[in-house]
Amino acid sequence: MSPRRFLIATLVTAAIPASALAESAHGEANFTGPLVTPAVNTLPAGMVNVEPYLVHTNSRGWFDSTGQRHAEKPTARQWQIALPMIYGLTENISVQLTLNAARTSVDGRHSDGLRMGDSALRVQSRLKAPEADGTGLVLAVSAAQRLPTGKYHRLENNPLNGTGSGATRTTLALGAQQLQWLDNGHALRWRGQLAWSPSPGRVRLRGASVYGTPAGFRGHATPGQAWNASVAAEYVLDRRWVLVGEAIWNRESGTRVNGKANGLAAYTFPSGHAFSLAPAVEYHFNPKVGLIAGVQFTVDGRNATDDVAPQVALNMVF
């Protein structure tokens, strides 16, 4: 089985979309954006978007190398707070900083309070802007850098304190988005992303770690490259309510661990992939403040955990 990866490992590279107001002869439509698929359109210069997330991840089991699901008891649970902050640097460039913290528990044991996870810095450049009324195709490219601010090794006192990966990982992505008004007077906005991350190189390991190494271990891990693809749609019921549907695919190449602990240790975690869905609903207090709530859950995978993650976020634009 691959080393445990909680949701905190995926959120740090995601760009949380800004709330938006689309107006046309048909009316108006407010959006917060879906739960996972990153923003494509950039913020106006000088505008700030903050969207705190509260996520409760339940790891119910895992999928083996043949895709067979196995239940796991007791289940691992994690409360996570994610804080993405986006700033419109220019009309076509936005920068984002995402901070994370989590508390993990398994079978009555838990981490030592709320522990900081890995952070991420992301820069996005818009290649094609929408039309004046918000319709039309939008294209953007982005580069994100994961910062290893979460603890990942020297975990002898409490293995559940491991909330990071130790890897300085770069992610490159291409995103597309389009808004259209339907004949029934409702608006539909879809967006998608394809992202690739090369191997981040060696991660130094000392003692017990999130890579499964024991106390006294000295060596390193070499994570492989990773791919991510997602597509989402937002259907506007009225100026306050929006329905959201989302599909996410993640793939990670194998991780190689080399080192010594009471002798030579060298092993490889196999590559794996997972497919998940994330339905949600949005409620908008006004064009600049919206609430989104939903759940992301795994439906298929290979060498991957089976997770269910209810979550809620408050999207605010200043």
Image (cartoon, rainbow, N blue to C red):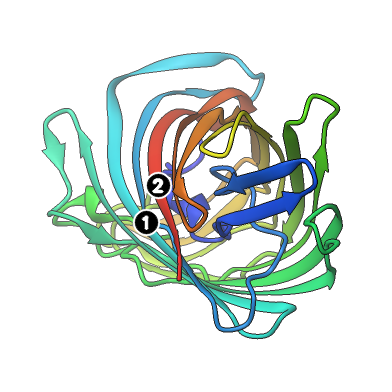
In this rendering, the answer to whether 170 lies above or below 136 is below
Residue 155 seen by the camera: no
Give the residue pinned by disc 2: 313
Residue ID at (64%, 19%): 67
Q: Position of residue 86 (x, y in %)?
A: 52, 71
Three-letter code for the amino acid on which mark 1 is drawn: Pro
Tag 2: Cα neighbours inside 10 Å, few (<14), some, or many (≥20)? Answer: many
The answer to whether the residue labelled 1 contacts the one labelled 2, judged by CB atoms less than 8 Å apart, is yes
Using the image as rendered, state which of residue 205 and residue 114 is in the foreground. Answer: 114
Q: Position of residue 286 (x, y in %)?
A: 46, 51
Q: Position of residue 285 (x, y in %)?
A: 42, 46
Residue ID at (29%, 62%): 207
In this rendering, the answer to whether 285 lies above or below 130 is above
Using the image as rendered, state which of residue 213 and residue 48 is in the foreground. Answer: 48
Q: Secondary structure at mark 2?
A: strand
Q: Secondary structure at mark 1?
A: loop
In three-dimensional space, the C-alpha distance between marks 1 and 2, rounded to whole angstroms, equals: 6 Å
The numbered dot on residue 52 is 1
- Which image quarter holds the C terminus? bottom left
In this rendering, the answer to whether 65 lies above or below 40 is above
Tag 1: Cα neighbours inside 10 Å, few (<14), some, or many (≥20)? Answer: some
Three-letter code for the amino acid on which mark 2 is drawn: Ala
Residue 30 seen by the camera: yes
> Reading the chain from its start, which is encountered first: label 1 or label 2?
1
Using the image as rendered, state which of residue 231 and residue 221 is in the foreground. Answer: 231
Q: Position of residue 77 (x, y in %)?
A: 28, 34
Residue 238, quarter of picture = top right
Q: How many numbered discs? A: 2
Residue ID at (33%, 56%): 163
